[in-house]
Structure formats: structure tokens, C-alpha cells
Amino acid sequence: MAQNSEKQNLKDLTQAEIADLISSLGKERYRAGQIMRWLYRAGSSDLAEMTTLAKDFRSTLGNIARISSLKREKTAVSRDGTKKILFRLADGHLIESVLIPGRNHWTICVSTQAGCRMGCRFCFTGKGGLKRNLLPSEITDQIIQARKVTAEGEEIKNCVLMGMGEPLDNYDNTLKAIRIMSHEAGLGFGSRRVTISTCGIVPAIRQLSSDVSVNLAVSLNAPDDETRSGLMPVNRVYPLAELLRAVRDFQMPGRRMVTFEYILIDGINSSLNDARELCRLLKNIRCKINLIILNEFPASSFRKPPLEKVQAFQKILIDNHFTAILRESRGEDIMAACGQLGGGEDINF
């Protein structure tokens, strides 16, 4: 019998790959759909639970395959109802997911890496650097495990890949995870319900639109290259002109629009002139702009601007006919808001 570490993890496989695996054992390919439903709809972590499969087949499959599960370490609950979940990976690294409450449903913010190597100066996650990429199973299992901390009847309807890490820096595993999320026998998220947020890795943005249908959110945060490069090192490799060309070319189904995320930092990118420059930069791009007031974290030298300054910034965008939404920070008191995830390296667990 193969050692457990050598067995194929079923949660790292698409339905087609599971079909290939069981076909090699002489079983019908359609049973891959049954296995997917047990994994993602029933949340099974043991082949013995898959009672629609013959017992001898389960035993044979168990010789070459296994099912992983993330270990849920702790859950912190914010005063606004947001939940932050700390997971321990098999090698000991820690990651976090966030459940954001809506009206009788949840949005989950999942991580794609343990840590991050992008080095954005306003983000707590990048302070510790990149530990490693997450496997497809470790991305999708955040959703499966998060279901266990929601009330009965409260569905996780939306998934945003905006947690720890840069999704497009872990392209292949992220893409496979999205395909599993979107499959009817998998997690069943429609394409309108999945959003990838990126700091702007241009070649991957171009590849993404030909590989899968998802919503795209781009972390912009400055209207000029000098300011953006000071905040986000990725801009030195893929400056604004190159990034915006890729965004213009990105294929969005129907009338969906690309979202630009703009974190407002006092004295850096939140002046009225910055707002006017942002209008000029995004002219003729079908988009909406999510304005996010900086979420502060320990040892950060940045500060959030006063609300009246934020509102004046927003008014300029609206007056120039942009859809500009001031996004409410959720879970800030437990370090669960945008830019605050640290893989357990905070005092709120």
C-alpha cells in the first residue's frame, strides 16, 4: 500500500482528473461526479462515508488516494458579526479566512498563499514575506470548513480571493481551485459569485480572461506611477499604462465591470488633486471604484484620512460620473479587515 504522503489528494483534482484516476482502476468515469459531491457538498473527509460507491471500490481507491482537511485552530468574532478563522496547514504554517455577514448569507474571503511576497506597504500580510503557495485543496477547503461555523440555513453565497497572498502569483493552483469552486458537482459558485483581487500582475491578468470567467478587482491605490511604486513594488515591473491596457482588454461577461480598489491613506493618495488625477487615469474604462479607508495595523506608519476628506474625494469621482462606493470596513476590531490578515501574528486570537 502507498504511504499516505504518496497518495493522490482527491481535493487537488478536478472532476476530469478524478475521472481519469478511477478509470485507471476500471471504474465508470461518471462516478467522479459522485465523488465530487461527497467531497464538496457533503463535506466528506473519509472515503468510507461515500456510501453510493461500492465498498470494495472505496477500499481500492483508498490504496492510492486520500482526502485532506484543514485544521481549524480558532475563530474570532467581531462586534459587527464578521468571523475570522485561523487554519493550520499540514506543515504547520498558518493562514486566515474571513466570513463577512450579509442578509441571510455570507461572503467568504479566502487566502491563496501563506504570507505574500508582493510587499505592499499598507498590507500586514506582506510584512512576513511569502512562506509558500497554497494547494488547490487548501484554497477550497477554507470554504468547506467555514461552512461549519455558520448557522443552519445561512449560505456562503460569494467567494472573494482577497485574503492572504496574491492569487495570480499562485496562478495554476488558484485557477484549479476556481474551477472546482465553479463546478456544479463541486462548490457550485456561479461565475458572478467569484472575484479575484490582484495587485496587478499583467501577464496573469491577460491569461486569466481566456482561462476562466470570474469578476476582476484590481488594487490600484494611486493615480500616478511614482506614488503607486512607492506603495506597491509590483508597479515598478508593471506600471500603470501597462496595467490599464490589460484591464481594458479583460473580457467580462455581460455588463459586468472591473472593480478598482483604492485604499485611502492620509497624506499619500487622498487629496482632491489625487481624485482628479484618478478621474483622468480611468477615463473611458468601464469600471466601478471601491474606496477603502486604510485599515491600520501594528508598526504601520500610515494613517487613515478624516471622513470629511474621504467624502470630498468620493464626491469628485461621482461628479465625474464614476460609480464610487465607500466600502465599509468589516472586522477591523479583530484584525480581519482588508490588509490586516497576518496568519495569526496578531493579538486577536
Image (spheres, rainbow, N blue to C red):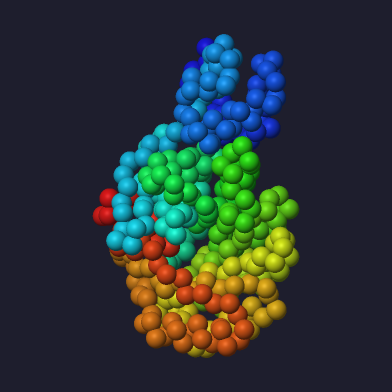
- Residue 285 lies in what quarter of the image? bottom right
Instruction: Kindly tell me whether residue 246 is visible in this rendering.
Output: no
Label total for image: 0
Q: In the picture provided, is 308 more to the left or to the right than 56?
A: left
Name the residue at 55% across, 13% down: 55
Q: Is residue 155 visible?
A: yes
16 w.r.t. 107: above or below: above
Q: Horizontal and vertical percent for residue 166? A: 53, 55
In the visual, does 3 lie left or right of 321?
left
Instruction: Report x, y in % for residue 337.
Output: 39, 62
- Which of these two is toward me, 274 or 320? 320
Residue at left offset 36%, top offset 53%: 83
Give above or below for 198 relative to 112.
below
Q: Position of residue 91 (x, y in %)?
A: 41, 35
Does 270 sit left or right of 285 as displayed? left
From what the image shows, is residue 117 above or below residue 281? Answer: above
Give the residue drawn at x 63%, y 80%.
281
Give the residue at x 39% y 63%: 330
Where residue 249 sits: x, y (%)? 73, 65
